[in-house]
Amino acid sequence: MNMAKSTFLIFLAILVIELIVVEGAFAGKHRQRGRQGQRKVMVSDLAIPRRHQLGLQREMKHKQPSFFHRPFGPGRFSFGYGYNENPFFDVSFSWMDSNNPWYEGPNVCFSRTEDKEDLKSEDQIKTHHMFQSQICDGSDTAYKCTSSVVTSEGKKTVTEIYECCPGFSRKPIDHGCPIAKKLQDFISTARELNLNELIRAIEAIDLVPTLTEANNSFTIFGPTDEAFQKIKSLPLSENEVPLQDMGNMVIVSEQATNALLQDTRNLVLGHLAIGTLTSTRLKNNQLIETASPFKSKIRVNLYDSPQHIMTTDCKRVITVDNMALNGVIHVVEEILQPVTDSLMDKISRNPDLSYLKTAVGRTGLGQMLREDGDLTVFAPTDSAFKKIDPILLNKLLSNPTCLTKILKNHVLLSVVCSAVIQEQTRTKNALDNYINLTRDDDDKLYVNGVQAISKDNMATNGVLYIIDDVLLVDDALNALIVAEKSGFTKLLDLIDTASLKKTVENLENVTIFVPTNEAIEALDEATLSDLANNLEKLQAVLKYHIVPSEVTCQGFYDNIQLDTLDGGKKLRINEYSSFPFQNKWIPTAQCAKILKTNVKSCNAIIHVVDKVLIPPSGNVVDVLAKDSRFSTLVDLLKKADLADTLQEDGPFTVFAPTNTVFKDLGIDAVLELQGNKDLLLKLLKNHIVQGTICCSGIFRGNWLTSQKIRTLSGEMYHLSRGHSDQPTIGHAKVTECDNTGTNGIVHVINKVLMNDQDDDMFWDWLI
């Protein structure tokens, strides 16, 4: 028995190999013929059976028993026993490759459409450009490629579709569409799909003759029986009409009958479109005209993530491409109601959305919500607005800029149907912020944690959800409110003391550098007392923190100077990188480290700094001259004719030894320096750097490399930080940082800067 079985399998393998060789020879010829045929039909916009393009198709039409039978197309082999059309024993396998795609097989229909769109522009001068793209997508029974070419003249879109011809289907391993399926009329097809209530509604309005007419072609979006059961019962024929009890008489209400029949007709026609629209011919956000007397359209949406689904008017499509003799049926899970109102119409007609209607009216967003588009709106109810603190609500409603951003936080620039939301996902809104969408185990929907109490309210230009809270976001709040939420209470106290609250609230499109509470507390008692007792000076300091334009961190670059509201006094931005020591980037504003950038509010960009920014009252020479600790240094700068240089635009960084440091050199040494101008000039230039070196820009080095700077004398000095994090330059410690002037910075050091050669030369000369 085993011997016989082995012999049979060997014999079978030999036959299979022989047939593969023969199959390959025929496949080459068929592919060549197919490509020739394809070139002949590419210009056609009609669906042409692919088998007529691919040449010979060998079929055994007689019904004699056969041990082997060969299905259509190259690249696949099967064997079995029985009749060719219905073998009772069938095994098949495929060796198709990328050079032999399935849609080049038999019974594949091809269509090509071409759309042109002129690019409207008022500009008379155009530059030459071209953008070309192609997107291809496939399923088991269709393959679609959309090619777009955009030039300065317009946009051309070509869509090519290969799909199984009507009456044919395929398995994933098949070449072409070899599986024949007998097509039926719409009613029979709907009955196979268990759309019994739809059939009864069609019969009630006498639409059967129209749907079965051979010359007609339709697409029906057919609701399930369960969907019909959720709505009020419809009359099923003229004999099944509502009755009225008139005392002892029961009479037929003709008016009610006609009304219900008309409702049935309107409902059914709202699910019916002209032409055969298979899933491959549907595009995302496509609006399909229906036969509804309301002239309503059905919106199609296609989603790939987080799940692959198709919706019509945000109702899930359960099955697609159920082909009938003269059209196609797509089964949907809900009744599609006619959509005739825009999003603005829906908001205006809902009495629970009066606050939202008022807010839209004050911002000018009504046009966007009326015109054509693909939007999702999360609409807060009146009770949601009333949950906001009344003072804050009044401020928001009276500030169109902030209000606009609040409303845009509730708008998505795409249609998101609830059916696609599973567990938690997110998408961006009109403010370019992420919105979190969640469906919980109880099938409740949440938007940023706020429950949607009504969903999928379709409009002509999108979909409306109703939510029970306002989605407040910092982008939509005034800068002072954002500062308060962030805990910067000390600054708010100073603004109140300076009577600038109303001024700051009314600012638009500004940049505010906000000091932390710790920064304000770090001010010495004398400065705090001076600011508290001098209202004009306090106002000047606070205004120095405000730039009259929006500047994000992307607009920062080293030594840029920004105008401020303090009489045009400028605020210097610097940037420092720790490379190659580490990978740090530190921006500063007037040498205060910027701790956090680009905090958004409705009227300002906020940057958080670690120091209070004191407006400079003069250049670096003025900074030195106003401090009695530097009187010796100032005298020496004047003797060396460097004082005038340090009053130029700069920027300069001065590492300034105090009088005590010079005193440690000895009185004779200072006097002798004053008598040798060349040596004095070189020594002083050791302490001056062309550029801005804030203490925040001095990093801790390592044993391999260290930070270096070149002074005006040409000497190089190491910059670093000791174990106590104190900055150093050469052998000197920086004992006080960042005394800023209009053209640079002054740091206090505890030693005179001399390299070894300078030191020897100085003492040799002195002796």
Image (spheres, helix red, strand yellow):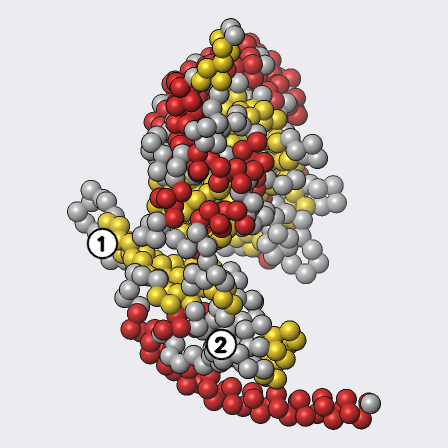
Q: CA distance from mark 1 to mark 2?
A: 46 Å
Residue 63 drawn at (x, y percent) = 53, 79
Q: Dot 2 surroundings within 10 Å: few (below 14), some, or many (20 or more)? A: many
- Left or right, residue 604 beside residue 608: left
Tag 1: amino acid: Glu
Q: Quadrant of residue 595?
A: top right
Residue shown at the point (82%, 89%) measured from the top left = 2
Tag 2: amino acid: Phe
Residue shown at the point (44%, 38%) measured from the top left = 202
Q: Dot 1 surroundings within 10 Å: few (below 14), some, or many (20 or more)? A: some
Residue 540 drawn at (x, y percent) = 47, 19
Disc on res. 153? 1
| Residue closest to the far left | 124
Residue 263 drawn at (x, y percent) = 42, 27
Asked if one can make out residue 637 in the rendered structure from this viewpoint, the answer is: no
Q: Which residue is mark 2?
A: 72
Residue shown at the point (44%, 34%) measured from the top left = 204
Quarter of the picture containing the N terminus is bottom right
In depth, the one of 621 and 223 nearer the eye is: 223
